[in-house]
Image (cartoon, helix red, strand yellow):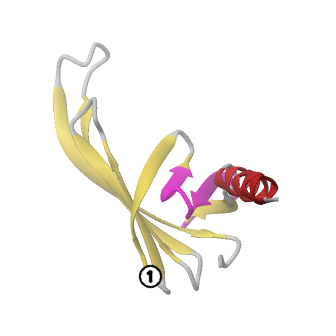
Amino acid sequence: MKKLLGMVVLNLLWCNIGISEITSLKCKLKNSQEWNIIVKINLNQNLMQMGDTKYKIVSISNDYITGLDYHSSAIGGDVWTLDRTTGEYFRGVVANVCKNNDCTKSKVEAFTYEGICKTKIF
């Protein structure tokens, strides 16, 4: 009986490890008409993804979720903050930008973006 109970408990723990809830949001830039940005948020794994960029969630509050992406192979990084109540997001990027076709001339620049996501989350 103890062996059976132990197997049931292990099975429940094993099944629970693989389950993670991912919330997908449709978002757009502030002045755009197209809802063409997909954002995925996985609070269990502390990850957010917008397009190909993955962010490590570094802060979660009742009002905001903030994620960071460090450009491991490049100069700079991204910070992305989502207002959990309004759906507004703010993104700042610092990157080394090529100034010619072969990228022999480049410059570190900063960019900011604002937008909104269709759904209030959580």
**At x 27% / y 21%, what residue is drawn?**
100
- Highlighted range, magenta: 30-49
Q: Left or right of 19: which side holds 91?
A: left
Residue plotted at (48% across, 59% down) = 46
Q: How many marks?
A: 1
The kind of residue on which mark 1 rests is Ser
Residue 91 figure quarter? bottom left
Identify the residue shown where x is 79% and y is 56%.
8
Mark 1 Cα shell of 10 Å, populated few (<14), some (14-19), many (≥20): few
Name the residue beneath numbered marker 1: 61
Q: Secondary structure at mark 1?
A: loop
- Residue under the image location 52 percent in, 56 percent down: 45
Is 41 covered by the magenta stretch?
A: yes
Q: Is 5 in front, or is 62?
A: 5
Viewer-closest of 68 and 17? 17
For residue 107, side relative to residue 61 (left or right): left
* Residue 53 location (% of width, % of height): 47, 43
Whole-percent x and y of residue 103?
25, 19
Q: 9 above or below 95?
A: below
Asked if 110 appears above or below 21 in the picture, the reply is: above
